[in-house]
Image (tube, rainbow, N blue to C red):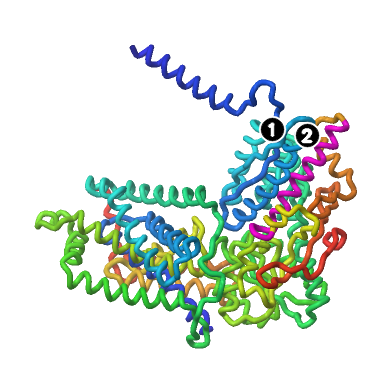
Amino acid sequence: MQIRAGVRSAALIGLILALALGGGAAPAGAAEPIALGMCQSTAPGPAKFAQAMWKGAELVIQDVNKKGGIGGRPLKLVAMDIGKNDPALARQSMQKAISFDKIVSLLCWGSNVMLQNGPLFDEHKVVAFAMSLSARVPQESKYVQQLEVVTTLVVRPVAEYVKQRLPQVKKVAVLYVDYEFGYEMVKAAESEFGRRGIAVTAKASHPIAPPDLRAQLTKLMEGKPDALYVANIGGGELVLAIRTARELGFEGLIMTHTGGDAPEIYGMGLTEKNFILDAHVVLDDAPAPLKDLAANVHGYASSGYDFAWISQRVLSALAQEGKPLGGEAMLAKLRSLARVKTPATEYQFFPDGTTARTLGVFDVHQGKRRLLQTFAPADSR
Amino acid sequence: MIAYFVNGIALGFSIGLLAFGLALIWRTAGMIDFSYGCVFLASAYAALGLHVLLGWPLWLAAPAAVGVGGLTGMGLYLGLYRHFLRRRAPLFVLVLLSLAAFTVTENGLGAMFTAQRFYLTHELLPGWTVLGVRLNAAHFSKIAIALVVLGALWLFFTRTRPGAAILAVADNRQLAEAVGVNVNHAYLWVFGIAGLIAGAAAVTTVIETGVDPFVGFVPVFLAFASIIVGGLRDLRGPLVGALVLGQAFHWAVWKIPASWQEVVAYTVVIGVLMVRPEGLFGGIQRFQGRT
């Protein structure tokens, strides 16, 4: 009786395993999809822009698949859970996506996530498009290609705009997240503002997900800065920072980076005055669904769109040339292109993994972002 | 300098309000209840849903969300803890259970609603200036509610039968049972009242910070720290502990980089405990060891 029960259990387990492993297999005769990976985060700041990027990428994938895919193969998007920008969890998710879904490229972010998983991308030759990370990352991994201008250079357009258009700003205070991203942003602020004759007079860090920013902002206000640069992660604490700064009586300019490109920031009455940010420019003739996503979900929707668009464009070119549709060929093709113009914006991809793209400085007007000045790829590098 | 002091007081009351509820549960049920964070989150998301999704005015959504906190507290007791408390489960089992419940809630909310932060309002809250520092309506609400709760709980415990029953159970559960006190009812009251307090703390907190699945972690953790600092002998302990912590957090950034804020604040906690391991007002029992 026990042996029979054991055999039955083994058979049941075998059946379950077979269904689990075989469940994802395409039906006989169906073309194998080409998989693109995208990180998804449970950290409050990145969660929002991760979702926006996913939706942006889906627009491209749906469009490409409607037209028959690439060489008859549909595209599919694979989610990779990185938790709260946890490198170890990211590794597990990426390994699974590489091994089971056979992703050829991916989009992710976070200095620690990308640095610690660089060897994985190189080993498996997966093109890793990267958002928002330290300048070190492309240096450490051959297969990383920035999609967003290096974090530090995101400060440049705002600093240049302030120098040109707001000469009354002489002193800047920086509120930054206590994380590698924040440390790099402080250095960038000191460098970019400093070389334009604007002094960074105070800086204060906050933990990720702070309960309160009054201590930090009180300290920053002591120096009576003309402007405050907020370098938080993904815009998550930005609403709290803006509201607290104004509550404490700060009336000067508040500046931030691309992470603040979100409807809840534009919807704040407090940002209609003395607030600017740099953000990704979405061209006027970009597809309407993308413009809608960028305006109503998060500006980073355009980056997800661009990732998928660039991937499929490179893969299509390789398919036409009869070359293998893998990461190694993708990377070589991408870096051989001088400029890439997507429906949303324009890029220059350099062999060292760095990238230049169009950025804009925006303010807020009647609940929407308003472009003040554009910075071309050359200006942003 | 005045600003650090005033802001520290505001933060202290914010932590202290939550600490009252935790202290109530700890004192009566003898358990460290991390799932208090579940109650905090339930009220937070209820406030968000009622005010933002359903469009209820804040003056209606806020008390309703506080009520959700009370119901959630009672629900947690009835659905989860009663079974273990009846069987006098060891403390570590109760702690693990509460941690697991909190983790499930945080991640469950993240899976259902994503980890995005949502806001009840994007505007400046009305406020008033105290000693040259502007505090907003949420700060004043927390201070007012904390003082009202302190007084109300004192009256409740000293002037009402359920209150007396709770004190009896807290002092000696077996004896209380022996003289006919309904322990189950006493615990239900405790978790319900603590839930209402958590709800009030949650609503007044998230109106400023916004709501996401992990917004409860830091306040609950700080509330525990304030109980350890202040002691459990009576409700003054958690409040004083919270005020000490609030000052520590703010003065920590006065002359040194803000990245040391938590280091300094928790060093103060360690310092207080080294001098008074039972808490400033006593009541944290020493470890008895195994016999």
Please determine whether, in this image, residue A227 is positioned above or below residue A113: below
User: Residue B149's quadrant in the figure?
Assistant: bottom left
Residue in view at x 10 percent, y 56 percent = B180
Q: Position of residue B101 (x, y in %)?
A: 39, 49
Residue in view at x 32 percent, y 58 percent = B71
Q: Give left or right: position of A18 versus A76.
A: left
Which residue is labeled 1 in the image? A102
Mark 1, mark 2: which one is toward the viewer?
2
- Look at the magenta stretch and give its main secondary structure: helix
**Dot 2 surroundings within 10 Å: few (below 14), some, or many (20 or more)?**
many
Q: Give left or right: position of A110 versus B111.
A: right
Q: Which mark is residue A70?
A: 2
Secondary structure type for disc 1: loop
Which amino acid lies under the numbered mark 1 shown in the image of this protein?
A: Lys
Please determine whether, in this image, residue B92 is positioned above or below residue B19: above
- The span picked out in magenta is A295-321
Residue in view at x 52 percent, y 52 percent = B113
Which amino acid lies under the numbered mark 2 shown in the image of this protein?
A: Ile
Q: Position of residue A370 (x, y in %)?
A: 74, 69
**Dot 1 surroundings within 10 Å: few (below 14), some, or many (20 or more)?**
some
Q: Which chain does the numbered disc 1 sit on?
A: A
User: Residue B123's quadrant in the figure?
Assistant: bottom right
| Between B219 and B200, the one nearer to me in the picture | B200
Q: Position of residue A301 (x, y in %)?
A: 69, 53
